[in-house]
Image (cartoon, grey):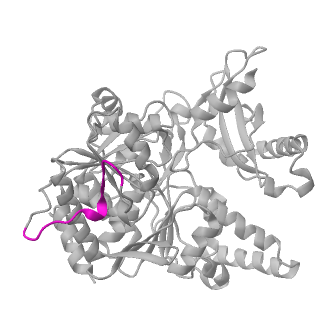
Amino acid sequence: MAKVSLKNVSIIELLVAINRRYSDMPAVQIKGGDGFRTISYIELGKRTSDTSYGLKKLGIEKGDRVAILSESRPEWSVAFFGIISCAGIVVPMDIKLSDAEIHFILGDSETKCVFASDKFVERIKTLKLKLPNLKNIISLDAIASDDVALLKDFKVPENETAHRDIYPEDTALIVYTSGTTGVAKGVELTYKNMLFEVKELNEYVKFNPQDHFLSILPLNHMLEITGGLIAPLYAGARITYCDSLKPTTIIRLMQETKTTAMICVPIVLKMFHGSIVRKIEALPQKQKRLFYFLMKVSKFLLNFRIRAGKIFFKKIHQQFGGALRCFVSGGAPLDAVVEEDFTIWGFNVLQGYGLTETSPVLTANTFTQRKYGSVGIPLKGVEIKIVAQAEGNSKEGEIVVRGPNIMRGYYRNKEKTDEVIRDGWFHTGDIGYLDKDGFLYITGRIKNMIVLGGGKKVHPEEVEEVMSKSDYIKEICVLGKKATAGLKAGTEEVFAVIVPNLDAFDAAKKQDKGFIREKISSEINILSENLAEYKKISDFTLYFDELPKTSTRKIKRKEVLERIVIPKKG
């Protein structure tokens, strides 16, 4: 079954054509207590029209902002397409935000209506009292409440027009940045941005009507909206929502649905990898030697483009459902060992790179063009250049881009927009280089850079990558901390906050913090042999909880510094 053409088509025409073409095929589903709750393509189209009409009746005009605050579920998709269909602007929100952060986003965007799951309705009702622009709350659940409309009650009468006309240059979404530093900014993305990404991602991942896509990332993240929602639906695939990042839950769903494709963040792949390696190490000696021998053979055959991993390691593939075509990895750097091992085992791991401001994907490895450690080649139509820094490595510099996927700008913030978009080029703030074949490598971020007293510069990401090779280190955040004594007083030194992997310690030692610190210190010393002297960690603190992260699993360095490091000074 051929895909619907994206050439010279509006998003509304595209949605109608998709729903007609795939009609009774399952579109989106989630597992509940009595099995899977599924919405077909034709039903998704009907409920989109119902929702669009309902929003119009509530007074939502073209360009009005409508937010969604909910876990990933089929109703999220209904709300999303309903907002688009009535020409509203979607404001997707992270369910982990505090009330203050939710209040800021709803106020800054002047949101008029919020779709919320039952878990968040009461919080929105309380905030509504302080938000003069917020007029309506719509529950995605069936629980009635005062002053709250129900999504299930929306119905479009026959012969009524549900949708409004929308055009490529219209704003489709305002996506607020994760807020790893400073105040969140609203990124305005257009239909043109979104349709470009859908078309290109389908060229790379090659979704098809036989695909069973597993959605594990939150839908407030642009990679999941374009690559995990619209792109699979555009191709007629089935999407299953997973409400947990626990490897056991993900694996169980992959087995049940025979998952063929999944977008994930590197930490998920690292958890999978760790589980597999532990099982290998627990094998009898003879079986373990055979396994590692087959890995060497598989790696050798890859030099001749012969992929034998799926045959050699069939049991691992069955663990993931036996039908997986690819993992798509984004959001953070992927450990090179994890990437290589999965490739040796016969899996396709397509690592990419992008930002919310770029809708989001800029580069990706493909089934036929990929390199370990690289984030791939630019999407067709995307231009990348490296702007060299004043000092240091001449091949490295800031990654600067332009193309059809660059945002319109930051919502109502021309000053911040002009800072990052100059002469049509978007300045990413990331540091990297292009190799002779056009593959992009990320080496750091300008704002994260540690500047030592002698003027040397350290990319924390480089140190983190080296240290993450230790089985005893679960998480690490490297940052600059000002020295308080000696000749270096007042200047930055390389400091680390480390979450130990307690599973790697014997039961008797898990409570012995002194022993754990000694072991971690020893690991740092050993691994530091791979670093220049000035890049070595001068001191570290242990942290026995998960480091604060954004919804896309990026560590909030500013929060780590303020909440964990600075209090340690005294």
**Rendered location of residue 354, percent (x, y):** 42, 50
Residue at x 57%, y 32% (from the top left corner): 558
> Magenta region: which residues?
145-159
What residue appears at the point 16 percent right and 53 percent down from the top-left corner? Answer: 56
Q: Tell me if residue 174 comes above or below residue 34 in the rendering.
A: above
| Quarter of the figure with the C terminus | top right
Q: Nearer the viewer, residue 112 or 340?
A: 112
Query: In the depicted view, which residue is nearer to us: 444 or 240?
Result: 240
Q: Is residue 569 visible?
A: yes
Decide: is 437 above or below 137. Answer: below
| 342 in the magenta segment | no
Position in image of residue 548 (x %, y %) = 60, 41
229 relative position to 23: left or right: right
> Which picture quadrant has residue 542?
top right
Image x and y of residue 528, in percent = 77, 42
Q: Could you tell me residue 253's position as x and y percent?
A: 55, 74
Most distant residue in the left direction = 159
User: Would you say the magenta stretch is mainly helix, strand or loop?
Assistant: loop
The reply, left or right, for residue 184 in relation to residue 512 is: left
- Judging depth in this view, the residue of 273 and 71 nearest the camera is 71
Q: Quadrant of residue 51?
A: bottom left
Residue 208 as seen in the image, left or right of residue 87:
right
